[in-house]
Image (cartoon, coloured by chain):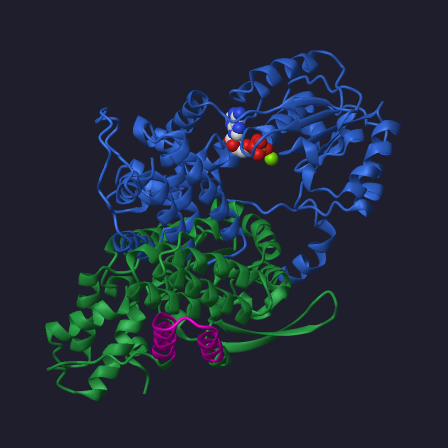
Chain colours: A blue, B green
Amino acid sequence: MAANFFAAKAPSNKTSVKHVVDPTLQPWVEKYRPKTIDEVSAQEHTVAVLRKTLTSTNLPHMLFYGPPGTGKTSTILALARQLFGPDNFRNRVLELNASDERGIAIVRDKIKNFARQTPRAQAISSDGKTYPCPPYKIIILDEADSMTQDAQGALRRIMETYARITRFCLVCNYVTRIIEPLASRCSKFRFTPLDSESASLRLAHIAKAESIDINQPVIDALINTSNGDLRRAITYLQSASRLSSSSNPPTPILPLDIQEIAGVVPDNVISDLAQTLGIDMDEGMDIDDTPKAKHIGFDPIKKKVKFFMREGYSATQIISQLHDVVILHHTLNGRQKSASALVFAEADKALCDGADEELWVLEVALRVHKAVSSR
Amino acid sequence: MSLWVDKYRPRSLDELNYHRGLSERLKSLAASGDFPHILFYGPSGAGKKTRISCTLRELFGPGVEKLKIDQRVFLTPSKRKIEINLVQSNFHIEITPSEAGNYDRVVIQELLKEIAQTQQVDLGAKQRFKVVIINEADSLSRDAQAALRRTMEKYMSNMRIILCANSTSRLIAPIKSRCLLMRVAAPSDEEMSSVLQSVARKAKFTLPTDAGNKIVDDSGGNMRKAILVLEALKMQSPDLTGPLSIAKPDWEVYCYKVADLIVSEQSPARVMEVRAKFYELLSHCIPPTVILKTVAERVVDKVDEALKADIMHWAAFYEVRMRMGNKKIYHLEAWVVKVMSLSKHFFYNIDMSDFD
Ligand SMILES: Nc1ncnc2c1ncn2[C@@H]1O[C@H](COP(=O)(O)OP(=O)(O)O)[C@@H](O)[C@H]1O
Ligand SMILES: [Mg+2]
């Protein structure tokens, strides 16, 4: 009986049935997505402009761009929710992202159909609040840079024709991947990587809400491993908390755990590699320019690289961390850094082409060594 | 008669001899009811597979060991049929998508969707989800990885994915950020010795420390290789005392010969001789990268310090080209020519800086 019921029902309900996820298993990035635009951290300028649209009935077409995890999707979803409230959201907002089929056929069909409908009258809000509910609909095209040129081209007409009743919000990482005729019709909003203070506050907020105990070094580790991408930082935090709370007895979260989760090579291990290559790692202790005569042979370097491979660290990770050490180093000179920069670039390309990791870590190590031992 | 590597393979997390911290973590995750997607990565022979099957057992009990092997046929968009072998139990399924070559995306999409949409049928199952193990995940095409990314979020409620890879370098960031990363380093020399000792105990003989150390030295962190060698040695000389010679595989010996040929004479005739040997190796299906690395490492062991870095440089250089190109032999040969001319110039003391 039950089986029949589902078999008959499921296909017709396809779009409305969402997988119900147990809230305790919900990813924190979803759970702590800002609910209002004021909750969005660090994007003050954007938020200030958007706040005005809440009180006027006007909204331009918009283009949000910026690196991943800076709040683009959250901002537009929060804005739409504040404009329409939960009851009107469904019939006023169409949200499509890269995982939905968005070829030209869909643009002509689904998007156009939604764009041309006259906005439905405002439903009475069930939560007792009043929402501005302006007389237009919003179409959110998230990850718009993955749409084909053709599909973007087809959008152009639709955007123009139905502008009175439909506003578009395009969201992307690279503004250059949006064709000019679309981009020029939109007000552009740039989202910047989160500064460490804002990221730190947000992470602390989440930690508090989940009642987990983290200290500043842990937050710093989260921020350093995620490069201004708050989504990554939050995901790492959730994994770390999962590990620490499931161990018996629960253990505190350590910065080292975060690095391990993020696949980062611990700092001391990288310093050790740098030292083997002849890079001075005692923070500017010797100021006098005594030429370092220590000649490091081929074998110690090869041995060190073998060790790294045995430890299982990924080549791209090792190389990117070594890159930072060399390029930000206080006493290496410009020539030495430039010579190293060349091999970092070559290695990156080679690894993208699927090259053998050990050969290229060794190549980088040998060439950096050569660069830093010449003056 | 199964090999010792299989026969004495640990079956539960508690039996795993090394990386106890990792085992503890896996154990508590399995018990927590909040088991995430996991990416196991590390060098070959470090024990990733073993750790994964122990984790499965921790999750589902001994039932996961009842395996059946199925062959499934998938239809590509161009209506080509591809056959894939699936190893599965009632609770999990294991695939090696590289078997599908360029069509791995189709296999991933079809198979995962199918699994994700069928609920766990076994009512006695300890978990509500099924586990999908994807071997050699780092050889998945970008397309397949993109397809995986979406599935991982969508079907979290009744499926968990365990990826197994040598390195994370070739996995796209969105996949990595959806998994808990578990780095499985190769065991240290001491850890390897103790595993060998425990295998010996199970096989009921005593392993002299010297013999054990020798095997460990020879196997470069690869536990599987070490146990295979142990078994082979034990067959050769049952008491394992006295001087032991660990037989190198034929292809490796052959590579060494090639290296010696390169080092001992540099001439056009020698290039031809070496080329014939490369062909021989390739025709025995030794992967070209393995050939190049093995020969190069042997060559640098035998030449002057001043040449070593350059020889490895050209090995790295031609190895990528070999991957991009079609004819492996061209690139192997080019490397040999390069190495020979380097050493000739070095010998006659000519400044090489104008030649690069
Ligand atoms: N500026 C921000 N303020 C608050 N939370 C943010 C911000 N940026 C990102 N987040 C967090 O990161 C997650 C991903 O953000 P999202 O808006 O989807 O990023 P994207 O810019 O890639 O669209 C959100 O769920 C939210 O928890
Ligand atoms: Mg987004």
Identify which residue, B111 or B6, lies in the foreground: B6
- Residue B340's place in the image compared with A10, above or below, is below
Q: Residue at x 17, y 66 (%)?
A: B194
Residue shown at 34% from the left, 58% from the top: B308
Q: Nearer the viewer, residue B297 or A47?
A: B297
Q: Residue at x 25, y 81 (%)?
A: B231
Asked if residue B255 lies in the magenta stretch, the reply is: yes
- Going by the image, does B241 lie left or right of A375? left
Q: From what the image shows, is residue B115 above or below residue B196?
A: above
State the residue in front, A345 or A235. A345
Residue B332, visible in the rendered structure: yes
- Judged from the image, the quadrant occupied by ligand 2 is top right
Q: Is residue A168 left or right of residue B343?
A: right
> Hey, which quadrant is residue A344 in on the image?
top left
Residue A270: name its quadrant. top left
Is A303 positioned to the left or the right of B181 in the image?
Answer: left
Viewport quadrant of the N terminus of chain A: bottom right
Question: Is residue B81 shown in magenta?
Answer: no
Whether residue B35 is visible, yes or no, is no
Q: Where residue B247 sits in the image (x, y, percent)?
A: 27, 81
Say which quadrant the C terminus of chain A sits in: top left
Toward the right, the furthest residue is A161
Query: For this rendering, which residue is in front, B145 or B316?
Result: B316
Q: Position of residue A199 (x, y in %)?
A: 44, 25
What secondary structure is the stretch in magenta mostly built from?
helix
